[in-house]
Image: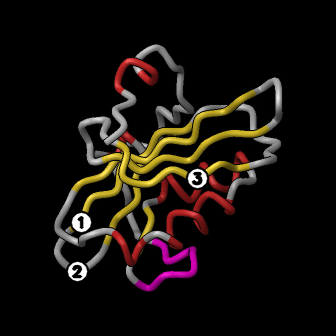
């Protein structure tokens, strides 16, 4: 299993310091199993990256609703592309997908926490 701890420790990630909890949850993507917090919804809007939500939802059937995951999108600025990862929270890669083109300008880190019924996507400041 690929471990990306050393690769990601030095990266800077998108941050929204105003996102410190959520007032409501949003079903944005293709899966009824995944809900997102206010902070993630705002991030999708600010960065115009609802496609990231779709990628997360496309893998929802492979994720357990009682586990914790970390999602990363690592940007390759030179190629205007990136790589999407879902890790087990200990940097062990469970899912990896190349995104051949993107116009966002930031690396992204999110958490997905299972609550037994849903997978809840949130920003690190909302955890």
Q: Position of residue 65 (x, y in %)?
A: 24, 72
Residue holding disc 3: 97
- Foreground pick, 60 / 1: 1
Residue at far front of view? 1
Callout 3–callout 1 Cβ contact below 8 Å: no
Residue holding disc 1: 114
Q: Which class describes the residues within 10 Å of circle 2: few (<14), some (14-19), or many (20+)?
A: few
Residue 125 falls in which quadrant of the image? Answer: top left
- Identify the secondary structure beneath mark 2: loop
Determine the main secondary structure of the stretch shown in magenta: loop
The residue stretch that appears in magenta: 26-32
Q: Which class describes the residues within 10 Å of circle 1: few (<14), some (14-19), or many (20+)?
A: some
Label 2, label 3: how far apart the Cα atoms are:
26 Å
Residue holding disc 2: 117
Q: In which quadrant will I find the C terminus?
A: top left
Q: Residue at x 56, y 74 (%)?
A: 28
Q: Position of residue 49 (x, y in %)?
A: 70, 54
């Amino acid at each position: 299993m690929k471990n990306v701890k050393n690769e990601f420790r030095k990266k800077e990630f998108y941050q929204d310091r105003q996102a410190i909890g959520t007032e409501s949850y949003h079903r944005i993507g293709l899966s009824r199993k995944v809900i997102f917090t206010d902070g993630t919804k705002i991030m999708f809007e600010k960065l115009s990256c609802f496609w990231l939500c779709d990628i997360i939802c496309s893998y929802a059937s492979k994720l357990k609703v009682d586990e914790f995951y970390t999602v990363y999108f690592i940007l390759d600025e030179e190629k205007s592309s990136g790589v999407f990862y879902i890790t087990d929270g200990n940097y062990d890669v469970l899912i990896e997908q190349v995104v051949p083109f993107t116009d966002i300008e930031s690396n992204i880190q999110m958490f997905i926490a299972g609550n037994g019924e849903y997978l809840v996507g949130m920003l690190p400041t909302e955890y």
